[in-house]
Image (cartoon, rainbow, N blue to C red):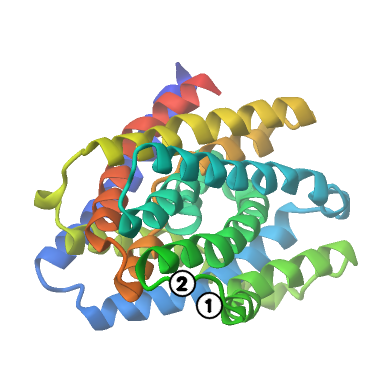
Amino acid sequence: METFLHAVASVTIILLLTATGYFCAVKGWMTAEVKTFISRYLMTVGIPFMLVYGMQKNLTRADVLAAPRLLLVPLLIIPLCVVLSFFVGRMMRLPHRQLGVFVMMAAMGNTIFIGLAMCVELFGDVATPYIMLYYLVSSCFTQLVGIPLVRWSGEAGGFSMQMVWKFLRAPTVISVFLSLLLVGLDIHLPSLVMSYAKYINNTVTPLALLLTGCIIHEIGLRSLRLTPTLGVMMVFRFVISPALGAALCALLGIGGLVRSVYVVELAMPVVTQTVVAAAEYGADEQLAAQGAAISTLACFVVTPVLMLLL
C-alpha cells in the first residue's frame, strides 16, 4: 500500500506539471517558438547532460559490463510487439494509412518526455542509467522501424539510410555511448563539470512535462474518442508490453530496480514522434494525435496500478 500511495503522489506531481504546461498553452504563453526552444534544449543540452551526470553518479564498471544482458529486454520485447501489432492490425483490416501508425503506437512508448519523468519521480536519480539504456534501444527502433512504418503508410517511402545517420548523430545517442565509455574506462569527470551537469539535470523533468502539456493542448482534449483501434492499441501499450517485459525479466533473472524501470518504461504512452511522422509523411495524423493524447492521460491512472503489481 505504501508503494501504491507513493506512486499516486508521484503521478499527481507529474500530472500537475503537465497541467501547468497545458494551462500555459491555453493562455498563449507557450508559443510555437517557446515549444521549439524547449524541445531543442532538452534533446541537445538537457537530456545529454542529465545522462552524463546520472551515469557518472550511479553507474559502475560492473554495470557497464552487464549492460548487454540488460539490453536484451527492450531488444526482444519491442520487435515482438511490432510483429504482433502488425498482424493484429492486418486482422482488424485497418486501412493502409492507419496500419503503420497503429504499429508504432502499439510497440513504441514515450521513453523520454513521460517515461524519464515518471521513472525519476518513482525511483529517484539512481534509475537514470537504466532509463537511458532502455532509451538507446527504444530510440533505435523508433527511428529505424517506427518512422519508416509510418512513412510506408503515408507516402510508401519506407526505410532510408538517412534515418540511420540521423539516429547515430543525435546528441542523446552520442551521450549514451560516451557515458558508457567513460564509466567502462573508470574515467571520472571533474567536479566543476559534474556540478554544471547537476544544474542542467534539474531542469529536464519540469521542462519535459511542460512541453507534454503543451502538446496535449495542441492535439485538443475535445477531439479524443476511444475507438476500437485505439482500444486495442491501449491494450498493447498498458497490458501486453509490460507483461511481456516482466516475464522476460523473470526469465533472465533481472530484478529489483532494473526490472521496475523496464516494466514502467514498457507501459508508457505513445511516443510523440508518431504524430510528427504521420503529419510529415501523409499517414493518418488524426489517429496518431488521438492515440498520443488519450494514452498520455491513461498512463496517469495505469502507473499507480502497475506499481501495485510490481
Q: Residues within 10 Å of mark 1 (few under 14, many from 20)?
A: some
Q: Is residue 41 left or right of residue 72?
A: left
Callout 2: SS = helix
Residue 202 in the image: x percent, y percent?
Answer: 49, 63
Q: Position of residue 175 (x, y in %)?
A: 67, 72
Above or below 229: residue 253: above
Q: Which quarter of the image is occupied by the N terminus?
A: top left
Where is residue 102 drawn, in percent x and y?
A: 38, 50
Regarding mark 1 in the picture, which secondary structure is present there?
Answer: helix
Q: Residue at x 35, y 47 (%)?
A: 14
In the picture, residue 182 is in which quadrant? bottom right
Q: CA distance from mark 2 to mark 1?
A: 6 Å
Q: Which mark is residue 198?
A: none
Can residue 196 be seen here? The reply is no
Question: Disc 1 marks which amino acid?
Answer: Val
Question: Does the image show residue 200?
Answer: yes
Residue 207's image quarter? bottom left
Residue tagged 2: 42
Q: Residues within 10 Å of mark 2 (few under 14, many from 20)?
A: many
As drawn, is 201 to the left or to the right of 283? right
Name the residue located 67 percent from the left edge and 54 percent from the top edge: 133
Q: Which residue lies under the disc numbered 1?
A: 45
Q: Amino acid at mark 2?
A: Leu
Please provide percent x and percent y for residue 71: 73, 48
The residue sitting at 55% across, 72% down in the picture is 159
Q: Quadrant of the C terminus?
A: top right
Residue in the foreground of this view, choosing between 73 and 256: 73
Query: Does the CB distance between marks 2 and 1 fall below 8 Å?
Result: yes
